[in-house]
Amino acid sequence: MGLGASLQAQAVTLPTTTITFASLPKATYGNPDIALSITQSAGVTTTTSTTPTFCSLVNNTTVHIITAGVCKITAANPGDLTHKPARDVTRSFTIAKAANVVTLSNFSWLSMANPTADLTTTQTAGTTTLTTSSTNYCTLTGNRVTAIKVGTCTIRATNPGDGNYLAAKTVSVAVKIALVSTVSPPTAFAGPWKIRQTTFDDTTSLNDVNNANSWVANNWYHTGLRFQIAQVVAKSTTHISYVVTDSLNRPTPNKVVNFSVGKRDGGSNARVRVGTQTTTGVDRTPQDQLLLTATTDSNGVVSFDITGLDETARVGLFVQLAAWITDLAVDTIDITNLEYSIPVGGVTPPVVPPVTNTRTLLWSDEFNGALGSAPSSSNWTPDLGDGCDNPAGCGWGNGEAEAYAACANKADGAGSMIITSSTTTGDATCTSNRAWTSGKFTSYGKKHFGYGYFEARLKMPSGGGTWPAFWTLGSNINSVPWPGCGELDIVEYAGNSPFINTSAAHYPANGGWHEYQMGALNNTTVLSAGYHLYSLLWLPNEVTFYIDDRQVANIKKSDLGLTYWPFGPNAAGVNPKMYIIFNLAMGGSYGGGIASGLNKAQFSIDYFRYYASNGYGTTPTNN
Ligand SMILES: [Ca+2]
């Protein structure tokens, strides 16, 4: 073999280096480094990441995952003296996004008494967002949930993930908002505290807030205080409630509230009684002041009853009431001035322009049935019992003395339906499990009414302790519990204050608790002496109550600053309906003491009529 032939043969036959590079499995972000499996027939193989954003190499033999995406690794080998360079080999694999888990903190203590909870979330990555669709029951501001009313509040936590983590599975927590929680809130009650008057309950009062505002405008009191002025009948009792809230706006139980009654300086004092204590009622002295304390209940509420003891009518018989707590940081106390300036027996009624709107009768029940007949079952259903098997509770939630029986509702055969309340002495043929048996019937499930004009011709019963009412409740009461469903009291009457009729709207305040607005007229004759017309004009944004076409109260949504107004269209634009209730209660929080010797009283209903008015009104429906 010659040398030339040998050299030529060597140049042609040098083998090519081969690289064996095993495929790489799929990976997930966060996985540990992945060892490469590479062998070669000669030389030294080097590896390079061609996607350095997603992966890098450690010691030439291990892949390190940086972020989700596609990782490409190229292996190269230059060969050696006896081998030609290898062809590059590239392997790629997908780095998937990792799982993302969201958790949402428990807030099962949320209740009307503890209406605020600051929620916390945990998440593997990304930004978690909280939302609620239960906006009738709770609201969200950032991560703070606030209960509005009793019902179910559902909070959803969503998280879209990020470059390395998948979208999280949505977490949803539903909490039943009760009036009072059985679970202690994790955050202790803490100041700064606020105390606000929530209930001003006197059947004989006439609110005069404008006058109070003018006092502030005159710099007689500094701004920030909230005032109410009420004229009340001598010897009547005014019920005042305050709610104490903490820095999270949670009504706070077990707070000691101080209460001052009397004129601190100047002016003249009516003589009043609070509990068992009485002021001296001496004019123009700064000493005639009672200082009392009481403790808030589980709803953060404390109440006082103030009874005026003076009977002589005169101008300027003032009593100033203020409640506060000892460590109050700022002046958020409310002050009420009672003016005991209406004489017993009434004054000339205020002149109010008569109603002039035209009305078209849409529906009525004239109650012209035969003697002894019940209210028509096409229109009415009797409510029965003492309330103990009803959500309202025993005594119908107001400490009432009666149980209702169907036998108490009977036509007189002369054009009126009579609700009779009686003891067994008054009527041995219509009795119940309570000392007093009386009647109540409602149009629920039979006649439900939209906006329009409601009117009944009624004769009030006589006798201390009687409490008749012609009123409405929202037809959605079974899904939106009171006070969320709304209540309109077209007339309530207490036989203990026989010159006075009252009307009221009950609704949830923005904080969720029960609030109401009430009006009253002081008439020149007792209302049990004859029939009068008691009416309501219900429009979407206001309600107006009348007696004999004189206005008793006008309550506008816009005046109350409410975010939720049960008497107008809901968030979905659906208009509410209400149903009618007639009843005659005895005693209780409004009726007061039942006169000794009273055994029977009668509430007479000549008719109920429903009219279209102001462009509103539709035929009643059965739901
Ligand atoms: Ca009639």
Image: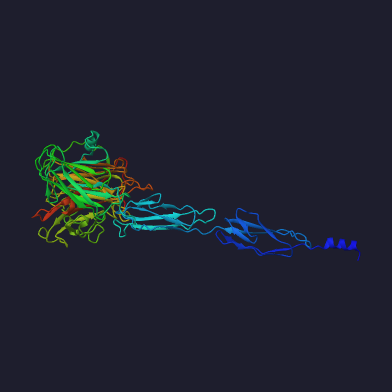
In this rendered view, identify the residue nearer to me: 243 or 388. Answer: 243
Left or right of 573, for residue 496: left
Place residue 67 in its image quadrant: bottom right
Q: Residue at x 71, y 61 (%)?
A: 44
Query: Compared with residue 22, is residue 272 higher up or lower down, i.e. above or below?
Result: above
Which quadrant is the C terminus positioned in?
A: bottom left
Asked whether residue 216 appears in the rendered view, the answer is yes
Which residue appears farthest toward the left when viewing the image? 597
Task: Tally the numbered discs.
Answer: 0
Which residue appears farthest toward the top when viewing the image? 218
In this rendered view, identify the residue nearer to me: 37 or 581. Answer: 37
Left or right of 465, for residue 327: right
Which residue appears farthest toward the bottom when viewing the image? 1
The image shows residue 12 at horizontal and vertical percentages of 84, 61
Query: Compared with residue 438, is residue 1 higher up or lower down, i.e. above or below?
Result: below
The image shows residue 315 at horizontal and vertical percentages of 13, 36
The image shows residue 253 at horizontal and vertical percentages of 26, 54
Left or right of 312, for residue 45: right
The image shows residue 205 at horizontal and vertical percentages of 18, 43
Colouring rule applied to residues: rainbow
In this rendered view, identify the residue nearer to me: 58 or 168. Answer: 58
Query: Compared with residue 52, is residue 617 higher up or lower down, i.e. above or below?
Result: above
Which quadrant is the N terminus positioned in?
A: bottom right
Query: Compared with residue 257, is residue 79 higher up or lower down, i.e. above or below?
Result: below
Asked whether residue 202 appears in the rendered view, the answer is no
In this rendered view, identify the residue nearer to me: 24 or 510. Answer: 24
